[in-house]
């Protein structure tokens, strides 16, 4: 498969247009030198539409479009729980987490940990996040993106890796978060339109030109792919273990991802106000509700249209072959838009964490107040340069590591979820206690982090199945269930250790006394709408 001349024109026009737009919004007023607030937090002036669209653009990339579509091919509609439960999680983030973060002028998640617990946990978690973002998130995006480029455009996969990484780097290198966030409304619009085109054409192909007949035939031909809650005898129960997606470990993964993940929450931290951030979160929640139509449905359609694929992750690129010239270029540009937006977001977050939480802290050994504000103009300029150098280094490492880490993976999306599941229970414990329990201390936080990794490793790799009753072993086999158990153990130990050790004097500078949790009528009505839609979706496809 290759792109026609008209397709190439569309893709080139997109690349030039979005790159030019990113550079235009990155411009500064005459005489103003870009500082860390400008580069890493878009001058703390993002409107709601930029926040909502940028949240989705940062999240929806090749790992979702290609990876989740592949899981739709292998598993079915049940994989959509990652999208639909995320919509519910965003409501919690907007109502309970953002008021604390914004009131305390938080720039990064490691910074919050230092102000709440102490310097050691900040350094440990900063290093952890850097490793995770580079070797798991960044590599997965450009690797799965390169698969799509190879299948659709016929470009050598290694060449595609370099092209995607380089374009995403250059796209945001000058403007930082502002360049990413203020262009993401274009990226998301293109993503949604392109995804709807693919869904429409796949269903009409199945239905012989009739959209609704195509959907009915798809449900009839692949009924096992249209259950949201999998039974124990389902071969993919280990990936999505029944009610645990609604009542168990998936909540742990979603809260950690949407509430405490730097490259996600960074958009909301850059809001011009709390109300604006909450409007953006509601906007993002509604976008999440329609994502399975764009991402998962084409993968399920491939079960009928391409039943003999070598790997599930080939489903989405294969469905793109149905597109006529011109439309193929548009949808391919939408896919590239998602890859570039998400890659640029992660590059910027890696640069933010390294520059503010590792480099500046180690170099200057300042007080917390000096570490977060009041730097000289020359120092600000130097830190922005460090951020740019970090961005270049990160993408080079990710390009080199992508094939060794993900080249043999059958379902990259599931690989990512399980690997990060070793860490997310501890992260969720640390932040929830830090936000809502003043007695929690640094010793308890470190114990939670260590317990999460060690216990997850033991439960997956070293604990003999024979050492456990069959029912217990069956329950702990799915990684989502393991996450729930590890969360409870980590939470219990963090509480015990916190109560048994003294709180260090002056360690907690996070102010929660006058935080406003009361939300606007618009937020409440929007949240109710999300909840009612979720109830209807699960009731229909149970």
Image (spheres, rainbow, N blue to C red):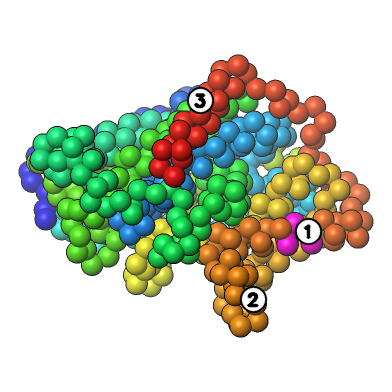
Tell me if 307 is positioned left or right of 466 in this view: left
Q: Which residues are magenta?
A: 489-493
Callout 3 crowding tier (Cα within 10 Å): few <14, some 14–19, many ≥20: few
Q: Is residue 307 above or below residue 401?
A: above
Residue ID at (37%, 42%): 292
**Does 4 appear in magenta?**
no
Which type of secondary structure does the marked residue at label 1 adopt?
helix
Q: From the viewer's perspective, is the residue at label 3 or at label 2 nearer?
A: 2
Q: Are marks 1 and 3 in contact (CB under 8 Å)?
A: no
Pick whichever of labels 1 and 3 is earlier in the sequence: 1
Q: From the viewer's perspective, is the residue at label 1 or at label 3 nearer?
A: 3
Callout 1 crowding tier (Cα within 10 Å): few <14, some 14–19, many ≥20: some
The mark tally for this picture is 3
**Which part of the image, by quadrant, shows the N terminus?**
bottom left
**Residue indicated by mark 1:** 492
Tell me if 244 is positioned left or right of 105 in this view: left
* Res. 186 visible in picture: yes
Disc 1 from disc 3: Cα separation: 35 Å
Q: Main secondary structure of the magenta part?
A: helix
**Which part of the image, by quadrant, shows the C terminus?**
top left
Query: Which label belongs to residue 284?
Result: none
Tell me if 347 is positioned left or right of 89 in this view: left
Query: Which label belongs to residue 529?
Result: 3
Q: Is residue 455 above or below residue 29?
A: below
Q: Residue furthest left?
A: 5
Residue ID at (27%, 65%): 311
Coordinates of residue 315 in the picture (x, y in percent): 25, 55
The quarter holding residue 518 reads top right
Disc 2 from disc 1: Cα separation: 23 Å
**Residue indicated by mark 2:** 469
Coordinates of residue 63 in the picture (x, y in percent): 38, 53
Which type of secondary structure does the marked residue at label 2 adopt?
loop
């Amino acid at each position: 498969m290759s792109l026609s001349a008209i397709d190439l024109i569309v893709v080139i026009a997109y690349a030039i247009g979005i790159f030019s737009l990113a550079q235009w919004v990155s411009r500064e007023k005459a005489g103003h030198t870009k500082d860390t607030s400008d580069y890493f937090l878009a001058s703390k002036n993002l409107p709601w539409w930029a926040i909502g669209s940028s949240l989705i653009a940062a999240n929806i990339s090749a790992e979702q479009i290609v990876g989740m579509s592949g899981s739709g091919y292998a598993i079915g509609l049940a994989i959509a729980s990652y999208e639909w439960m995320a919509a519910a999680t965003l409501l919690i983030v907007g109502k309970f987490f953002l008021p604390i973060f914004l009131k305390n002028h938080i720039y990064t998640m490691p910074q919050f940990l230092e102000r709440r617990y102490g310097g050691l946990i900040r350094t440990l978690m900063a290093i952890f996040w850097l490793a995770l973002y580079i070797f798991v998130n960044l590599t997965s995006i450009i690797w799965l993106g390169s698969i799509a480029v190879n299948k659709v455009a016929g470009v050598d996969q290694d060449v595609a890796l370099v092209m995607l990484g380089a374009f995403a780097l250059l796209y945001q290198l000058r403007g930082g978060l502002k360049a990413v966030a203020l262009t993401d409304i274009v990226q998301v619009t293109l993503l949604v339109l392109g995804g709807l085109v693919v869904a429409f054409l796949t269903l009409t192909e199945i239905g012989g030109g009739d959209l609704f007949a195509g959907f009915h035939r798809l449900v009839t031909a692949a009924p096992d792919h249209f259950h949201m809650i999998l039974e124990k005898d389902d071969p993919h129960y280990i990936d999505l273990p029944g009610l645990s997606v609604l009542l168990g470990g998936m909540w742990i993964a979603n809260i950690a991802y949407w509430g405490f993940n730097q490259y996600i929450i960074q958009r909301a931290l850059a809001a011009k106000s709390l109300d604006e951030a909450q409007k953006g979160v509601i906007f993002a929640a509604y976008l999440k509700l329609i994502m399975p139509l764009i991402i998962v449905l084409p993968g399920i359609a491939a079960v009928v249209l391409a039943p003999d694929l070598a790997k599930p992750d080939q489903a989405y690129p294969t469905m793109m072959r149905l597109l006529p010239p011109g439309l193929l270029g548009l949808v391919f540009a939408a896919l590239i838009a998602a890859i570039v937006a998400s890659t640029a977001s992660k590059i910027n977050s890696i640069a933010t964490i390294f520059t503010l939480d590792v480099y500046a802290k180690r170099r200057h050994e300042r007080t917390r107040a000096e570490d977060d504000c009041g730097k000289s103009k020359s120092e600000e300029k130097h830190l922005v340069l460090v951020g740019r150098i970090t961005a270049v280094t990160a993408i080079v490492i990710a390009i080199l590591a992508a094939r060794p880490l993900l080249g043999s993976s059958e379902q990259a999306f599931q690989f990512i979820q399980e690997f990060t599941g070793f860490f997310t229970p501890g992260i969720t414990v640390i932040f929830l206690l830090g936000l809502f329990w003043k007695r929690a201390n640094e010793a308890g936080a470190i114990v939670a982090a260590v317990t999460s990794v060690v216990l997850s490793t033991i439960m997956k790799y070293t604990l003999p199945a024979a050492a456990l009753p069959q029912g217990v072993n069956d329950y702990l086999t799915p990684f989502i269930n393991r996450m729930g158990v590890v969360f409870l153990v980590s939470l219990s130990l963090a509480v015990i250790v916190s109560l048994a050790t003294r709180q260090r004097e002056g360690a907690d500078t996070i102010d929660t006394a006058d935080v406003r949790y009361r939300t606007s009528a618009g937020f409440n009505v929007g949240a109710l709408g999300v909840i009612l839609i979720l109830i209807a979706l699960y009731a229909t496809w149970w």
